[in-house]
């Protein structure tokens, strides 16, 4: 396929949500697969609802997902003159007419139709006004919208790459508005003009637009322009099979990013909402997707968004991340949590490089590095209450941990094997189980009940920190016997 040109055309009236992100991803994959061009277009003609900061947020989310665009971002708000020109052309050709009906009149008619259970299609009041009737209304200062004159008979259809043949009787399509009476173009006009001007070959968008497409097909016909190919993507439902919405929890890309979901994960997860890669692979990289993606393999059945699968996928992908990539992602996470220290890039680089893979096996999200993994990057951390309740009960622990600190401070060499011998020796001398000391020391060193192997943790933290933390725990235990020891400080 030569010269493929596709576009992603978000309206900046909200953050980039998962449905939009999937549309962007499929367009991007299709373009990359065929060496085509991926265009970004901001559909911001609704001045009241479009916000510049949302444009920035959308671009940010796309970049985070790794979906780079080749042209744009173009803004519809900068192309108003062009839409006016095409609208005038459609009117000149007799495919559009001015409509003087006011919003109130239209609303009243729609309400009546609803009461009488009729379709609330525009009734054509202004469709056949004579020239003098139009002039009289204009002279009265009545503002006019411009409507498309839909043929009375016949049908309008198109061959969708996903949904197959879609056709609608023209008498079911209302004379839709091209230009509003406030001078703003509608979505239908903007999208057709832009897709033509931008030489879009394939319109790939959500199935919520399926019912819009016949109107746009009519507009292409009226302009004597060839149709692009259309591919509508299946709807995304929540686990309860209702259309995915805020009720189901986070829907924006930014919210998943904040939860510590990796961009690789979200892209992988979204790709599978409607597309099954060959071999039904569940974990697939962007590069592999580019090699394997086809629109023909997109299903028209609704896709179900399963947050548990997303969580599973995130820990799988996290576990497989190459070291350099993981290090940079963790750096980003620590930066946003205020835990990043420049030393991690210089004199403590080696320690940072050893710590991250240690936490990698257990982490489910990037957040785990800054939350449960906090003690690996900062000396101020809290003791998890449950861990304390469970592992700091034995009244002898203050003494044991204090003694362990003394022995470790003299240990030579300070390595995992020696540290383990040291702890086990102490347990034996005191006549307690090694597990008692291991669990208590784990809480002392990491604040957590669950952490990587204790002796690896010791080596990673280094002797000085280990000794200081054991002493601090011993002190807390002595002073706070039975009291609230939830906060370490
Ligand atoms: N601005 C429209 C939307 O956000 C784009 C629809 C289209 O791709 O044609 O849904």
Image: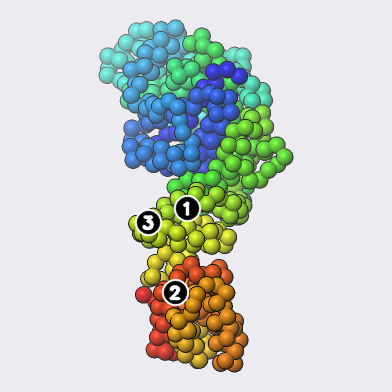
Residue tagged 3 = 346
Spatial CA distance of label 3 from label 2 is 20 Å
Instruction: Tell me which colouring the rendered structure shows.
Output: rainbow
* Quadrant into which the N terminus falls: top right
In the displayed structure, would residue 52 be above or below residue 164? Answer: below
Spatial CA distance of label 1 from label 3 is 14 Å
In the orientation shown, which residue stands out farthest toward the front?
412
Task: Return the x and y of residue 464 as percentages of the image width and height.
Answer: 41, 74
Q: Quadrant of residue 157?
A: top right
Look at discs 1 and 2 and give the one toward the viewer.
Answer: 2
Q: Considering only order in the chain, which callout, 2 or 1, is on the residue closer to the N terminus? A: 1
Task: Return the x and y of residue 226 as percentages of the image width and height.
Answer: 55, 12
Q: Considering only order in the chain, which callout, 2 or 3, is on the residue closer to the N terminus? A: 3
Q: Which mark is residue 347?
A: none
Residue tagged 2 = 463
In the displayed structure, would residue 472 be above or below residue 108? Answer: below
Residue tagged 1 = 327
Question: What residue sits 52% from the left and 87% below the top?
Answer: 393
Residue 434 shows in the view: yes
**Around disc 3, counting alpha carbons within 10 Å, would you say few (fewer than 14), some (14 to 19), or many (20 or more)?**
few
Spatial CA distance of label 1 from label 2 is 24 Å
* Quadrant into which the C terminus falls: bottom left
Q: Quadrant of residue 134?
A: top left
Task: Return the x and y of residue 40 as percentages of the image width and height.
Answer: 44, 29
**Around disc 2, counting alpha carbons within 10 Å, would you say few (fewer than 14), some (14 to 19), or many (20 or more)?**
some
Q: Secondary structure at mark 1?
A: helix
Label 1 beta carbon within 8 A of ligand 1: no
Question: What residue sits 36% from the left and 11% below the top?
Answer: 133
Q: Secondary structure at mark 3?
A: loop
Question: What residue sits 53% from the left and 89% below the top?
Answer: 394
343 to the left or right of 154: left
């Amino acid at each position: 396929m030569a010269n493929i040109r596709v576009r992603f055309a978000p309206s900046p009236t909200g953050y980039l949500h998962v449905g939009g992100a999937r549309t962007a991803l499929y367009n991007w994959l299709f373009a990359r697969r065929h060496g085509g061009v991926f265009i970004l277009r901001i559909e911001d003609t609704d001045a009241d609802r479009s916000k510049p900061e949302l444009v920035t947020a959308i671009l940010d989310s796309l970049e985070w997902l790794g979906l780079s665009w080749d042209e744009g971002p173009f803004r519809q708000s900068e192309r108003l003159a062009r839409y006016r020109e095409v609208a005038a052309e459609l009117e000149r050709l007799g495919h559009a007419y001015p409509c003087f009906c006011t919003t109130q009149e239209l609303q009243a008619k729609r309400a009546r139709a609803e009461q009488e259970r009729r379709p609330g299609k525009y009734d054509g009041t202004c469709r056949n006004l004579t020239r003098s009737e139009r002039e009289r209304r204009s002279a009265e200062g009545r503002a006019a919208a411009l409507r498309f004159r839909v043929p009375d008979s016949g049908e309008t259809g198109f061959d969708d790459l996903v949904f197959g043949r879609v056709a609608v009787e023209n008498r079911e399509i209302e004379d839709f508005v091209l230009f509003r009476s406030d001078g703003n173009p509608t979505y239908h006009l903007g999208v057709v003009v832009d897709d033509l001007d931008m030489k879009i070959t394939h319109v790939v968008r959500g199935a919520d637009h399926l019912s819009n497409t016949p109107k746009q097909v009519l507009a292409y016909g009226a302009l004597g322009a060839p149709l692009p190919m259309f591919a509508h993507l299946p709807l995304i439902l929540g686990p309860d099979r209702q259309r995915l919405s805020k009720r189901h929890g986070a829907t924006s890309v930014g919210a998943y990013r904040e939860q510590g979901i990796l961009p690789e994960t979200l892209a992988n997860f979204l790709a599978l909402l409607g597309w099954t890669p060959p071999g039904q692979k569940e974990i697939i990289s962007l590069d592999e997707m580019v090699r394997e993606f086809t629109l023909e393999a997109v299903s028209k059945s609704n896709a179900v968004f399963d947050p548990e699968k997303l969580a599973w996928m995130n820990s799988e992908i996290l576990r497989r991340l190459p070291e350099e990539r993981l290090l940079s992602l963790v750096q980003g996470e620590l930066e946003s949590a205020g835990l990043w220290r420049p030393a991690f890039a210089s004199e403590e680089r080696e320690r940072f490089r050893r710590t991250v893979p240690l936490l990698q096996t257990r982490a489910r999200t990037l957040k785990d590095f800054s939350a449960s993994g906090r003690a690996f990057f900062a000396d101020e951390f809290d003791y998890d209450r449950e861990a304390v309740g469970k592992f700091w009960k034995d009244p002898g622990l203050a003494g044991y941990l204090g003694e362990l600190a003394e022995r470790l401070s003299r240990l030579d060499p300070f390595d995992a094997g020696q540290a383990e011998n040291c702890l086990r020796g102490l347990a034996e001398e005191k006549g307690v189980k090694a597990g008692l000391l291991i669990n208590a020391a784990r809480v002392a060193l990491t604040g957590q009940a669950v952490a990587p192997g204790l002796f690896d943790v010791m080596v990673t933290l280094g002797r000085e920190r280990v000794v200081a933390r054991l002493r601090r725990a011993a002190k807390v235990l002595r002073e706070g016997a039975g009291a609230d020891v939830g906060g370490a400080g």
